[in-house]
Amino acid sequence: MATTDILHICGSMNPSYPSVAFLGGATDDYVQIDASAVAQVAGSYAFGTWIAKVMPVDRTSTMTIIGAGDKNAVEFIELNIEAGKLVARCTDATVAQWVVTTDAEACPPHTWTEVALVQDGSFPKLYVNGVFVAQTISTATDNVAWFDQTAGIDSMRIGAANKAGDDSVTQEFGGGIAEIKIYGSTTNEAALTAAKILDNYNRKFTTTSLYNHYRWGDYLLTDAGTGADNGTIVGAVVQSDCYCEFESRFRTKGLVTADYPVIAVHGGEAHCMVIKAA
């Protein structure tokens, strides 16, 4: 037995949230919510807010939190983590309309971070843990573009993008995503103010214009928003009622049935010693 055959995995069990965990990496894993995209396009929604809790597994990958796209053309709106930074993009008929990126790392690995994208009819805004953070709009062709302009969008995914114009799956998420909220409307009530974004972070959220709400408790994919678009799991996606730092670290180790893990919990922290199979 080599020294590399002994692993010590440790991490906090708090906070924990009902979540979906994306396990496969670049293997077409996501939660499909196409009806949400179709309805927002049909309603010509010009305003909106996307909110999610995210726990990525690394700080180097490009991974999509929420992505809406066109199955037949290069047209999309997406909220990503790119090398640890929070990035939102909108492209209409192959032309990039806007790109906004946080100036600093926003989503460290194995840590719960609440992120938000707001389109308020003036320009897109990013929030991290309830706060508007330093960010740069690097492309500003049309800062007000949203579903009312991207009329070809007909698919939507949690945990992956559809941006190549051929319905392919890219930028798959690695880690856990919890508490998705998608607001949309033809009026700016769907563009949450800074105060409401902070309220949401403090667990006091508004239901006005809340089109989709995925809480994922009790292993359900039920949409509690007015859209009633229950998600469909595709690929290696599992549900967890209490996804936390320890689970995030544990799942990245690639343990198999023949490995021998021993787990102990003390003071809200879990430790696992593993002797890898020969």
Image: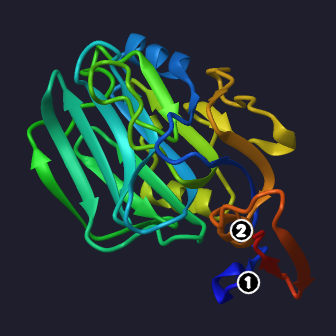
Question: Is 169 located above or below residue 277 in the figure?
Answer: above
Taking depth in this image into account, of 205 and 232 the one nearest to the observer is 232
Quadrant of the rendered image containing residue 198: bottom right
Callout 1 touching callout 2 (CB < 8 Å): no
Q: Position of residue 67 (x, y in %)?
A: 42, 35
219 sits left or right of 131 in the view: right
Q: Are there few (<14), some (14-19), or many (20+) residues within 10 Å of tag 1?
A: few
Return the disc, 1 or 2, that comes first in the chain's sequence.
Answer: 1
Residue 1: which numbered mark, if any?
Answer: 1
Question: Is 39 located above or below residue 81 in the figure?
Answer: above
Q: Nearer the viewer, mark 1 or mark 2?
A: 1
Q: Position of residue 163 (x, y in %)?
A: 30, 30
Q: Position of residue 254 (x, y in %)?
A: 66, 61
Classify mark 1: helix, strand or loop.
loop
What amino acid type is highlighted by mark number 1?
A: Met
Classify mark 2: helix, strand or loop.
helix
Which corner quadrant holds the C terminus?
A: bottom right
Taking depth in this image into account, of 5 and 201 the one nearest to the observer is 5
Q: Residue at x 79, y 74 (%)?
A: 13
Q: Residue at x 73, y 83 (%)?
A: 1
79 sits left or right of 112 in the view: left
Taking depth in this image into account, of 206 and 14 the one nearest to the observer is 14
Tell me if residue 219 can be seen: yes
Question: Is 29 located above or below residue 198 in the figure?
Answer: above
122 sits left or right of 186 in the view: left
Question: Is 105 located above or below residue 24 in the figure?
Answer: below
Cα separation, mark 1 vs mark 2, equals 21 Å
Q: Position of residue 54 (x, y in %)?
A: 56, 57
The type of colouring in the image is rainbow
- Tell me the residue that label 2 is attached to: 250
Q: Are there few (<14), some (14-19), or many (20+) residues within 10 Å of tag 2?
A: some
Q: Residue at x 25, y 70 (%)?
A: 103
